[in-house]
Image (tube, rainbow, N blue to C red):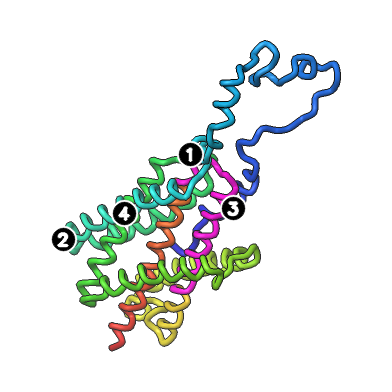
Amino acid sequence: MATNPVFDRINKETSGYAGFGAPQQHSAPQGSAQGQQGAPMGYPGPSQSMSPEQLEQMYQQPPAGPAQTGRLTLDDVIMKSLGIFTVVLAVAGATWFFVGAQPGLAMPIWLLGMFGSLALSFVIARAKTVNVPVIMVHAVLQGAFLGAVSVTFEAMYPGVVSTAVVATLGTFAGMFLAWKVGFIKVTSKSRRVFGMMAMGYLVFLLINIGAGFLGFGDGWGIYGGPLGIIVSLFGVGMASYSLAIDFDSIDRGVKAGAPEQYSWLMGHGLVASLVWLYIEFLRLFAILANND
């Protein structure tokens, strides 16, 4: 996937959660019901007085954390991401063995997984509510796509899959450390520029798929030409920076106290970016092997 619309939605909506869950403070006018009772409804008032022991016990309680108030936590995002990633890997593994035994099914599964997951990614991003079943269906389709494309490339260029996996994991760790220490910055301007470039790259990929089916570049499309490696390196760079944006968006969502349900969206978006990076590396190493 060449863009991650999920985090665009999260960035827009979580900006309003800076005070999520905090009661609003209002001064009650003299003569009002609140002023006469001494406390708003739901809070201890003259008719709900607490004993000194009860007050002492209340004051000694630790403040409510995100888990008690229904707010987003980093643990939520990590667990949801791992759950979604596990589904993707399980389906990819099953597809690998299934397609390996019946190579003729590789292309139909490849196309179904690719276009199906791409369509659902926009549905998930535009939906007004977090739809967990749709997110899991997206994970299944993405896993099927990964399995089909991986077993096909491995049959053509042995060793390319393991190389792409190592490069993906290394880049993921490197991008996280670079973002964490501030070497790579994510700003509002960089988000806008990245969004426009990502959409343009997505259009390019769709055009290139059509060119490949028409036989252009020996089935590689534009990637089969002299600029193939350069364009592929650009795709790796785009997918890598997408991870930095994901890390920053998760951090902003947690700090803003966004609702816990957003952990599903963030996990979905992070896994989608990771898959995108793997596909870019897989294509790059396949092109290099093809040119040897």
| Mark 4, other Cα within 10 Å: few <14 / some 14–19 / many ≥20 | many
Amino acid marked by disc 3: Asn
Amino acid marked by disc 2: Gln
Which of marks 3 and 4 precedes in the sequence?
A: 3
Residue for point 59% across, 30% down: 59
Q: Are marks 4 and 3 in contact (CB under 8 Å)?
A: no
Amino acid marked by disc 4: Val
Name the residue tied to disc 4.
88
How much space separates mark 4 and mark 2, taking CA atoms?
21 Å
How much space separates mark 3 and mark 2, taking CA atoms?
43 Å
How much space separates mark 4 and mark 1, taking CA atoms?
27 Å
Relative to the observer, which residue lies in front, 241 or 41? Answer: 41
Name the residue tied to disc 1.
67
Name the residue tied to disc 3.
11
Amino acid marked by disc 1: Ala
Q: Is residue 133 above or below residue 107?
A: above
Q: Do the residues labelled 4 and 2 touch (CB within 8 Å)?
A: no
Based on the picture, tell me whether residue 175 belongs to the magenta stretch. Answer: no
Residue 202 % position (x, y): 48, 66
Based on the picture, tell me whether residue 262 belongs to the magenta stretch. Answer: yes
Locate the C terminus and report the quarter of the image it occupies: bottom left
Name the residue tied to disc 2.
102
Residue 168 visible at all: yes
